[in-house]
Amino acid sequence: MTFDPAFLVLPLILGVGILCAAVVCIVALCRAHRTDTVAVVKALPELAATFLRYRRGPRR
């Protein structure tokens, strides 16, 4: 059985991508004005619910 090197590197690339996205989000929240940060944190539950609705599929 042969292993493709891309399959070995893929988890590493995904992990680094997730880590970079988390760092960017944390830095953006830290640099934002306090009122903007509060608004973003308050909007997170609604945003998560919207993504879950789209993940389940369109309503009919």
Image (tube, helix red, strand yellow):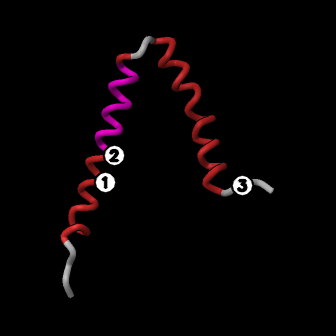
Q: How dense is the environment of label 1, judged by Cα within 10 Å: few (below 14), some, or many (20 and up)?
A: few
Determine whether the residue tagged by mark 2 lies in a helix, strand or loop: helix
Q: Label 2 sits on what residue type?
A: Ile
Mark 3 sits on what residue?
A: 58
Determine whether the residue tagged by mark 1 lies in a helix, strand or loop: helix
* Residue appearing at x 45%, y 12% in the figure: 34
In the shown orientation, is residue 43 left or right of residue 32? right
Q: Quadrant of the N terminus?
A: bottom left
Q: Quadrant of the C terminus?
A: bottom right
Spot occupied by residue 22 in the image (x, y as percentages of width and height): 35, 37
Q: Label 1 sits on what residue type?
A: Leu
Q: Are marks 3 and 1 in contact (CB under 8 Å)?
A: no
Q: How dense is the environment of label 3, judged by Cα within 10 Å: few (below 14), some, or many (20 and up)?
A: few
Spot occupied by residue 21 in the image (x, y as percentages of width and height): 35, 39
Rounded to the nearest angstrom, the CA distance separating label 2 from label 1 is: 6 Å
Q: Are marks 3 and 2 in contact (CB under 8 Å)?
A: no
